[in-house]
Image: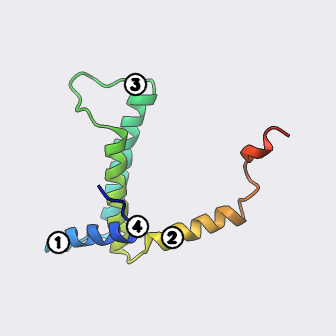
Amino acid sequence: MSEKTMQEMQKEVDNYISQFKEGYFSPLAMLARMTEELGELSREVNHYYGEKPKKSTEKENTVEEELGDMLFVMICFANSLNIDLQEAHDRVMEKFQTRDKDRWTRIEEEGK
């Protein structure tokens, strides 16, 4: 599988959703879907890394699969609101590199 830019992923999801008359869900419905997917991700993380193992009757999912579901819903949410996730990411990284640049201990500073 080839590497994709965020814009390419957003376009790919938009092409998929655009096939259907229903289109994107409303923002509130999208938030509900994201919450649902976050719950499923939480459940998987708890099973793999927490104290609650799966029941033998439960479907085998992976953290990777659930993160993929979260990403899909997040892209749908962004597309439905005409948000460019690459631009959003760049703004967040700028914030971390300026406002929060001294918030955590850098690896090269640990030995001093």
The amino acid beneath tag 1 is Glu
| Front label number (4 vs 3) | 4
**Quarter occupied by the N terminus:** bottom left
Image x and y of residue 105, in percent: 75, 46
Q: Hey, what amino acid is under mark 2?
A: Ala
Q: Residue at x 51, y 70 (%)?
A: 88
Circle 3 residue? 52
Q: Residue furthest right?
A: 112
From what the image shows, is residue 92 above or below residue 105? Answer: below
As measured in the structure, the alpha-carbon distance from the residue carrying label 4 to the one carrying label 2 is 11 Å
Query: In this rendering, would 107 be left or right of 11?
Result: right
Depth-wise, is mark 3 or mark 2 nearer the camera?
A: 2
Q: Residue 22 — which label? A: 1
- Where residue 104 appears, as percent x and y from the top left, is 72, 49
Circle 1: element type: loop
Q: Alpha carbon of mark 4 to alpha carbon of mark 3: how far? A: 35 Å
- Foreground pick, 4 / 89: 4
Quarter of the figure with the C terminus: top right
Tag 2 secondary structure: helix
Secondary structure under the numbered disc 3 in the rendered image: loop
Looking at marks 1 and 2 on the same chain, the residue that comes earlier in the sequence is marked by 1
Three-letter amino acid code at the position of disc 4: Met
Q: Residue at x 31, y 25 (%)?
A: 54
Disc 1 vs disc 4: Cβ atoms closer than 8 Å? no
- Quickly name the residue at label 4: 6
- Residue density around tag 3, few if under 14, some if 14–19, many if 20 or more, within 10 Å: few
Mark carried by residue 96: none
